[in-house]
Amino acid sequence: MIKRIRKAVFPVAGLGTRFLPATKAVPKEMLNIVDRPILQHVVEEAIEAGIEHFCFVTGRNKGVIEDHFDMSYELEDTLKRRGKNKEHAAMTAMLPAAGATSFTRQQAPLGLGHAIWCAREIIGDEPFAVLLPDMITMSAKGSQRRCMKQCVEAYGQHGGNIIAVETVPPADTHKYGVVSIGADNGHSFEITGMVEKPPQGTAPSNLIISGRYILQPEIFELLGAVGTGAGGEIQLTDGMKALAAKQEFHGVRFDGRTFDCGSKLGFLSANVAFALEDADIADAFRAELKGALG
Ligand code: UTP
C-alpha cells in the first residue's frame, strides 16, 4: 500500500539575486501577486492537494515568513471589533493549524538539493511533496486542480516518485533539467532519464522539470552523498538521478498555467493573470490594461 502524502517542503533560503534590489530586505517569496505573497499562493496549492504539515527551509533575513504563517493577534482582534469580517476571514482562512508548520535553516545557500536535505529530520521516513515557490500555478478554467493536486493524483496511480514537467520550445531546453520519456498515457509517463542543462540540440525531449515533486525519503541519504554539481551547488537533480537507479519516477504534464516568479517577466505575467481572475478588480483592471496598451 502506498503511503499518503502528508508533508511538504518549501525551500525558501535562496538569495533571490535576480530580483535585487527588491529582495535586499524582503524575501523573494514574500513579493506580492495581487493581494498575497507568492509563498501564500504556493501554500494554498499544497493545502488543496491535502498537505497537512508545512516545512519551510529558510535562511537569515527570512523571519517575516514565519510571522506571515502565524496569528497576528492584534490585527485579527482589531478587524473583528471593527466588523471587518471579510478582511478577517482573508487573514485567517489560510492559516495552517497550530503545530502544522516547521521552520529549519539552511545556514548557507549551498543549492536546492542541500535545502531539501535540511528537511530530513522533519520529514522522517515517509514520502513528501516539494514545492518551489519560484513557480506558481493556476488551474485550468473550471477546475480546482493546481499542479500539486495533479501530482498527488498521479502518485495515487503510480506510487514511487513524481515530477511535474512543462513543455518549452526546443531552443530553450539547454537552460533547464530535461527528462526522457518511456511508457506514456498522455497525462503522465514513465521517466527513463534526466539531464541537467543539456547542450543545445542534445535534449532527449522538450519536457523540463518545473518545480513540483513527490519524493521518497531515500532521497535524503543520496542528497547527503552527491556532493556539489553544476554551479558548485548541491543539485536536487543529481540526487534524483541517483534515486532513479533504484526507484521509479513518473512525469506529470500539468493541465493549467504556470508562472516563473523567479524572473521579472514571469512575476509580472502572474500579477496580470491573477488580477484578471480576481472578481473584485478584473473588469476595472481589464479596462486599465486596454487603456495602457492603447
Ligand atoms: P533559485 O536558484 O531559483 O533561487 O532556486 P535563488 O537562488 O533565490 O534566486 P536567484 O537565481 O539568485 O535570483 C529555486 C528555489 O530554491 C530555493 C530558493 O529560495 C528558490 O525558492 N533555494 C535555492 C534554497 O532554498 N537554497 C539554495 O541554496 C538555493
Image (cartoon, rainbow, N blue to C red):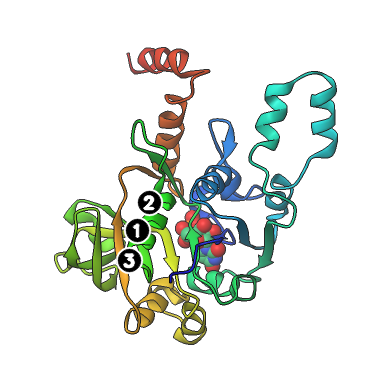
Tell me which amino acid carries mark 3.
His
The image quadrant where one finds the C terminus is: top left
Q: Position of residue 78 (x, y in %)?
A: 84, 27
- The reply to whether residue 203 is in sight is no
Q: Report helix, strand or loop for mark 1.
A: helix
| Left or right side of 133 for 198 | left
Report the disc number at residue 158.
Answer: 3
- The reply to whether residue 139 is in sight is yes
Q: Going 61% across and 57% down the picture, which residue do you hit?
A: 54
Q: Position of residue 84 (x, y in %)?
A: 75, 20
Tell me which amino acid carries mark 2.
Gln
The residue beneath circle 2 is 150
Number of other residues with Cα within 10 Å of mark 1, as a class: few under 14, some 14 to 19, many 20 or more:
many
> In the rendered picture of this protein, how many numbered marks are placed on residues?
3
Q: Quadrant of residue 105?
A: bottom right
Q: Going 62% across and 61% down the picture, which residue do you hit?
A: 55
Number of other residues with Cα within 10 Å of mark 3, as a class: few under 14, some 14 to 19, many 20 or more:
some
The residue beneath circle 1 is 154
Callouts 1 and 2 close, C-beta under 8 Å: yes
